[in-house]
Image (cartoon, rainbow, N blue to C red):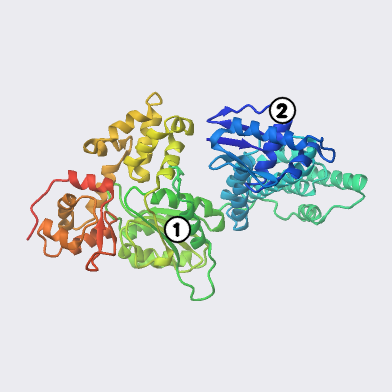
Amino acid sequence: MLEFRLLGPVSVTRAGTAVPLPGTKIHTVLAVLLLARGALVADGRLSAALWGDAPPHTSNSQIYTYVSRLRKVLGKAAQISRKGPGYALDVKDAEVDLFSFERLDRLGRQALKENRHEEAGRLLGSALGCWSGHALDNVSEHLLQFERPRLEFLRAEALERRIQADLALGRHRSLVPELLSLVARFPMEENLRAHLITALHRCDRQAEAVQVYGEGRRILDEQLGVVPGPQLRKAYLRMLRGEGAAARRKPLVLLPVRAAVVTGRTAEAARLRSLLLRRPSGQGSRLRAALVTGMPGSGKTALAAEVAHGCAQAFPDGVVHADLQDADGAARPPAAVLAEILSALGDTADAGRAAGHELGDLVRRYRARTAASRLLVVLDDATGDAQLAPLLPASPDTALLITSRTRLVTVPASSTVPLEPLGDEDAVALLAETVGAGRVRAELPAARDLVRYCAGLPLAVRIVGARLAARPHWPVARLAAQLADPRSRLAAFSYGGLALTRTLDRALSRLSPATAAVLPWLAALGPGPFTARLAGEVTGLAEAEGALEELVDACLLSSEPGGALGEDRYRFHPLVLLYAGELPRTELPR
């Protein structure tokens, strides 16, 4: 795959190796075509970028020569087509650093606007990381004159927004050296100077802050004949009044570490953020909750943790997390969960015996504690509405983020985000996050085979990725060959503390004994689709539909309408089918 760089010296790499581009003129033509984003670039526009107002009489033939050379070095991965009086470049699936910068900057701006400062800082930092020097560093002076100021302005704005996010997160001490350097390089940038005054003030370095303001006022007067603008004046006055001397209080954040990579869930994450960050609409507002559902191993917990970390700054009273099941998979009593949350929130009354208190007393204390709080409560792996009911907060100012393998009546369908299996490309991207993009690119066909055997299940991809990462000398094809045999595939999905069969065992333990006994018999039906009538014929059960629906609720089967007689049709996920086929069969009640 090709990678194009504009935010620094214009260059092209193919699979990590530089593609030779001889001469300034070739770099200029490539930059103009890339900046057009696939639109037609007229010959006159190319001529102006190459020679300004004094093109040679052979300009058209020279442009044709440059384009021909570009076609040759870029190959089939990018297409330059002649369209009327100009050229258009289609980069297909290639990466362009400018486009990546703009996307990350846009997401960072939105996160900053919604007070998701941690996420904003991360996104904007990644956007700035797309730069490798001054934009368009090896093109003609004519193109540089037109395009570099615009691009450098976008960079400066992204930098300022990232500094805003860092200040909001209380990172003023680490910002001071960076801001001192930036102000020295850009002495007339008032916003940077204002941020430096704020950071110095929060570090109790008021004398230096006064000096920074005085120097800025002098430079603006001598160089431009103007007085400081409103932002610089306000920062100075806030410092003189002693306002904001301490950094903004960071909320309590008690969440699992972001250990798992979350890939391919952009739309689902955006939907969850929207549900959690919507503001209550007055008295009588409904519960503010979002529910993530999906089959075992679909990445519900990892996605919830990622979203909660990103939203933390929008909840000034904190973020707390509670597991709703024990290590062995049994549902935890609501009283134990409430005692844990209350302790995290600083309610230490009878902390040693809290779990033994009457449930009603714990619920009253919990709801009193959250009545006027802007809090995010993350409840992981809820077993059902009965377990969840005592954990509902008293006020819509407190939001709930819940994960469960089944849909819950407590949370409306409009606030439920189901996780489907990943597509092959997203699964390959997740594998690359674990084992390295270069290794995956080098054996892309084998990597695609590998993730196809994982059937879009993130847990399975993470496990095979961990195995490969621990064995850098293994070809990807070696592990793909091990997974090719369905009889040994499940055994391969185990590494370290991760095991797919253990996750599925926990899901099986939550089923009623009768339904658990039916599951291995259903494996004889294959992946599906099949109807309840056919399942009844195979198992001999008169009421097979009830067992099938319980399996659907547990996300061990999926269902869809459309049978010939209006019957629902059921399907197995490929890995659940393998699991069911390995379970022992016991005699079913007739």
**433 or 63: nearer the viewer:** 63
Q: Quadrant of residue 209?
A: top right
Is residue 179 shown left or right of residue 37?
A: right
Dot 2 crowding, Cα within 10 Å, few <14, some 14–19, many 20+: few
Residue name at image x 25 percent, y 61 percent: 569
Dot 2 falls on a residue whose secondary structure is loop
**343 or 466: nearer the viewer:** 466
Q: In which quarter of the image is residue 186?
A: top right
Is residue 465 shown left or right of residue 281?
A: left
Is residue 57 shown left or right of residue 162?
A: right
Residue topped by disc 1: 377
**418 or 534: nearer the viewer:** 534
Residue name at image x 75 percent, y 39 percent: 182
Q: Which residue lies furthest to the top in this view?
A: 473
Dot 1 crowding, Cα within 10 Å, few <14, some 14–19, many 20+: many
Provide residue 257's location: percent of width, then percent of height: 45, 44
Mark linked to residue 491: none
Q: Marks 2/1: CA distance?
A: 58 Å
Dot 1 falls on a residue whose secondary structure is strand
Q: Does 476 sit above or below residue 314?
A: above
**422 or 33: nearer the viewer:** 33
Evaluate if marks 2 and 1 touch, with contact meaning CB atoms under 8 Å apart: no
Provide residue 384's location: percent of width, then percent of height: 31, 62
N-terminal of the pair, mark 2 or mark 1, is 2
Q: Quadrant of residue 89?
A: top right
Residue name at image x 20 percent, y 61 percent: 531
Under mark 2, the amino acid is Gly
Under mark 1, the amino acid is Val
Residue topped by disc 2: 23
Provide residue 504's location: percent of width, then percent of height: 26, 47
Work out whether residue 299 can be spotted.
Answer: yes
Q: Which residue lies furthest to the bottom in this view?
A: 284
